[in-house]
Image (cartoon, helix red, strand yellow):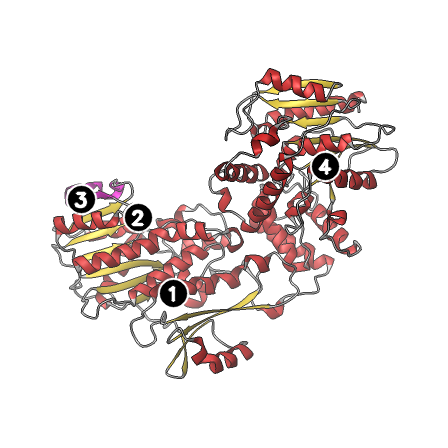
Amino acid sequence: MQAWGQTPRTMVLRLWLLSWQACPVNGDVQRPELAALAGITEVAPQEYPIRCHWLDLPEPRLSLYARPLAALLADPALLPRRMAIRDDYLWQTRLQASPLVAPATVSNLLPVDGTFLLLGGTGGIGRTLGEHLLQSSQRRLVVLSRSGNCPDNLLGYRSRIDLIAADIADLARWPAVLDSLRQRYGRFDGVIHAAGTGAGSLIRQRDAQTLAASMASKTLGMLAVEELVKQMTPGFVLYCSSMSALFGGAGHVDYAAASAVLDGFAHYRADSADTCVRLSINWDIWRDIGMAAAEGVGDAAHQQHLAVGLTAQEGGQVFDAALGAQLPQLLISTTRLETARQFYPLRHGAASSPTDIKLAGQSDTDLRERLQDCLCKWLGVPSLDEEASLYELGADSLTLLDLIDELQAATGEVLQLSQFSPTVSLREVLMLVQSSETDEAKADDEWDVAVRIDPWHAGAGRERLYLIHPVGGDVQAYREMVAALHPDLGVWVIADPALRLPELPNISLVERARLYLQALQAHCPQGSVWRLAGWSFGAWVAQAMCSLVPTDHRQPLLYLIDPPAPDAGLELAQIDEDQIQQVFKREFSARRPDAPTAGLVNDTSRYLHSLTVCCRNNMASMVEYRPAQLPDTKARLFIATRPNPYGIGTAWQLADLQRAWQQLLPHSLSWQPLDTDHYGIVAAPWAHVMAEMINSDFESGLG
């Protein structure tokens, strides 16, 4: 999906997901873990303009079902989203609306003096059901959670609560925990599995490791529960699933898939002699508790859903009724099913039917209105001035990535973040699309035509500043500095072509400098005065570009932002894989200055792949390179005085480093130490310090 999603939409995609013995057509299932496909089946069409079907077979030998598969694939237009083949018939899942009747008596699964195990008791639903159980004065509750803390709402029942600190997703330690539970309690009357995390993200921003981690508390926790059932035979196990397993939800593929796995295990029985009653409740949204209420999302549809959500009292009543009915799976909806589905809408850019996709693009008016609608929704504003800065309205890099996806879906054009200026507006985006459509088509998978120079600010005269990308390839880290530059100074950027063309072969640093200089000279109008700036690896490239300027040409003013030491290639040749991975993380953070550092490596996998390619190639090109002396170039150096966070580039003392660079740049105008590290130097306040120096040079006519 991620690979298809980053290509121009010139074809319709039909996605078929196959499993075997994962759907409860004739009773219990054999492969409950494959029910995760239910979540993907619902979410993928909400995020991408595709048609998706899940087909469950009786057994894994596909060759036995070649003919029915061929028939289904030939004409899927009217087929349901979920299907199963059993006994030569095609079956489909149906939701049967039915009122949930309150039980006349307490379920036999809920003895008034019973002991119950609550997994995930610190979460909203878990602690609410725990409090509901404790309304019977003789019941006891064992709460197992990672923290081992007692939820505030249960403090009044503390004498009847045992607290256990353990992680049910840690299967290596679970046998010891289970042995302790068995010795202490012997048997539980019931187990409630309410553990889970509310982490979520779009499919294009997920990778396998992150997906597994976010699903672990539900899915691995469920394996822990199954082992508990085997050894302690509780009266029942209740899996707290979600409506998202059936209706999806853009940005929640992991949550929907994990919930669907819980549903699968409600229909699973490892041993036919097992008497434990298994139930799964696909909960609707809870009004005041639970993950959805805690998200604080301002989206109108979400708020409308919360308004009809379950109260704590209603949740307790549903729990009693479900234990009385003892059906393996119940979807709880506070509204009609047709209304409930409306709370799980398509994400902008995903069409309700692939036939609705305009592969040939849209009119300018249609595109403008479409992007305005998307941006208003994402930014939470009622209207949008085309000239307004999207950053000032609250956009961040993720918002712009969504915008890029939307443009790709609407026009087939694939833009890059580097093309958006620090003051990017809707009008600028529309002009980029128009410019892209009118450009002459050319093959740009070779280096001699791959270099692109993107405008960030036109300026008001003949003075231009060209910014060269750092080792990660992107130029977004310069955004704070550029925003503080003089408005009359034109700013243009060169991002690594490998960010958009990761199959480009690696080249030497000198060859890269030659190609960048060639592109710059072709781009810069005659009579213009240009200067160069680069951070990190970009500083070396900018310095190398200056070394290639003919001696009879005017030398540009050069700004080097924390350049690597002149002999850094020797050190780079010796760093290990862990250090390289840390560079990847920090480079991705620098590309996304408005996003938190934690978890960045798990975000936007196609961009991470491109970043990885750029980092490896650019670091490799530095190993054999030594900066040349520039006898006629005026330069300013901005140096971070704090150690690199990952120990790279610490071999030089600051005074020795200054002398080494002054030998290479005898006409150096200044050496400015800044009290920050290599990554902090491009953020405020240091980005503003550098901008002030560049502005001063511009205003004085230096350059």
Residue 409 horizontal/vertical position (percent)? 63, 59
Disc 4 target residue: 510
Contact, CB < 8 Å: mark 3 with mark 4?
A: no
- Tell which tag, 2 or 1, sits nearer the viewer: 2
Q: Is 486 located above or below residue 49 in the figure?
A: above
First reached walking from the N terminus: tag 1 or tag 3: 1
- Tell which tag, 1 or 3, sits nearer the viewer: 1
Looking at the rendered structure, the kind of residue marked 4 is Val
Looking at the rendered structure, the kind of residue marked 3 is Asp
194 or 368, which lies in front? 194
Magenta run includes residue 145: no
Side of 561 relative to 52 (left or right): right
Label 3 environment density (alpha carbons within 10 Å; few <14, some 14–19, many ≥20): some
Disc 3 target residue: 162
First reached walking from the N terminus: tag 2 or tag 3: 3
Provide the residue span drawn in magenta. 150-165
Q: Which quadrant: the C terminus? A: top right
Disc 1 target residue: 35
Side of 476 relative to 340 (left or right): right
Dot 4: element: helix
Disc 2 target residue: 170
Q: Measure the alpha-carbon separation of dots 2 and 4.
A: 50 Å
Looking at the rendered structure, the kind of residue marked 1 is Ala
Residue 101 horizontal/vertical position (percent)? 26, 67
Residue 588 horizontal/vertical position (percent)? 56, 40
* Mark number displayed over residue 409: none
Contact, CB < 8 Å: mark 1 with mark 3?
A: no
41 or 337, which lies in front? 41
Looking at the rendered structure, the kind of residue marked 2 is Asp
Dot 2: element: loop
